[in-house]
Image (tube, rainbow, N blue to C red):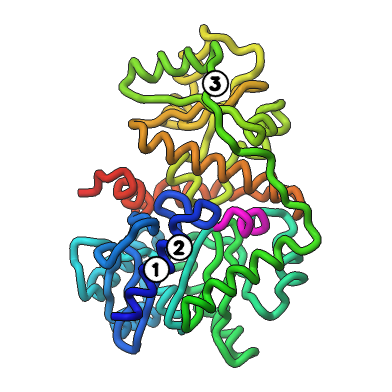
Amino acid sequence: MKGMEELIEISRFYGGNPAYVIAGGGNTSFKNHKHIWIKASGIPLAGIDENGFVCLSREKLRQIEVKAYSADPVAREEEVKAELTKAIVTPDKLRPSVETSLHNLIDYKYVVHTHPTLVNGLMCSNHVKEEVEARFGDLALYVEYTDPGFILFKKLQKRIGQYREKHGKTPQIIFLQNHGVFVGAHTTEEIRELYRFIDRQITDGKELTLPSCKVLDYESVVANAVHNYVHSRGLVSRSIRCDLVDHFTRDVEQYLKVSQPFSPDIIVYCKSQYLFMGKDADAEIVGSAFEQFEEIHGYYPKVIMEEQGGLIAVEENATSLDTVIQVFTDEMKISYLSESFGGPHFMTPDQIRFIDNWEVEHYRRKVAKGSAQ
């Protein structure tokens, strides 16, 4: 089917570019009158083929739009997940993206949802609303951060409806604060052109050159102590430096600009709390720092920033370790870019807790690690 061929091609195009998609983030879809094909949860877009998509009945998805669900957020999301499962046509062994109903609502053949670094430099800034209005006007819909899942869907259902009433069509560009962007069109070439337009509008009049991100391995007393400590517990670590890392490890004031997550993806792959080691830290305090961190947060830090040193990542295996480095590097890029739009705007503690406890994101993390049952 031509539509699926083009969906696979556009998915790989953006999924293979870390400026738009990292790890298992983002999702894409293609729809006709009866069915929608959407990326399965946790499956990376880079290299995806037809086996990475789930086909669902659009009629059954429309039933979700009008049903009432539990007021309890945990029960509600379980109920909606069960309804999504009932809508699956094939295959039944994969779980469709939690944003499936949202894709179904956007009435263009193709929808490409990504978390671009440049876009999130704006979405995760203090002046995002004013900047979007000034740079895009009525050409885009901006929606303030909302917990993902059914609540986000209902808010977008309302806001898209209001946009349609005013403009006579569904918005092709939907910006979500601290999240990313949805782009919809009837052709994949128009999708590409809209993304190029977005980049032009965001960069217009701004100097957004990032410090060098060329990663070099490095050693220090603290880095070696971390390596020895986590290795004794069956974990692995890697220590890196680059100009971007140096920018945020210069002192505690700079570190505070990346000390909290900007988006759900950061939490999924790097957790929500990180460890900062002051310049006077030595090997003797590493163990106690880790133990204290675990006692407070319930897990070991995946990211350690060493003042005037480097970034140390900790994970279960080398592949997951690379993902932590990629994702937290993106966190630093977003923070740096946000300075041009009023400074960084983090997720709130309540928003972070929702993602930390959401079963959907635990599942996505499992699939990304290749251990989903």
Q: Tag 1 or tag 3, which sits nearer the N-term?
A: 1
In three-dimensional space, the C-alpha distance between marks 3 and 1, rounded to whole angstroms, equals: 38 Å
On screen, residue 344 above or below 280: below
Residue 7, image quadrant: bottom left
Task: Count the numbered circles shown.
Answer: 3
Residue 125, image quadrant: bottom right
Residue at the image position 39 percent from the left and 31 percent from the top: 315
In the image, 108 versus 18, the foreground residue is: 18
Q: Which mark is residue 218?
A: 3
* Label 1 residue SS: helix
Type of amino acid under label 2: Phe
Name the residue beneath numbered marker 2.
13
Type of amino acid under label 1: Glu
Whether residue 41 is in magenta: the answer is: no
Residue at the image position 47 percent from the left and 20 percent from the top: 290
Disc 2 to disc 1: CB gap under 8 Å: yes
What are the residue bounds of the magenta stretch? 116-123
Whether residue 122 is in magenta: the answer is: yes
In three-dimensional space, the C-alpha distance between marks 2 and 1, rounded to whole angstroms, equals: 6 Å
* Label 2 residue SS: helix
Type of amino acid under label 3: Tyr
The secondary structure that dominates the magenta segment is: helix
Name the residue beneath numbered marker 1.
9
Residue 89: percent from the left, percent from the top? 21, 75
* Label 3 residue SS: loop
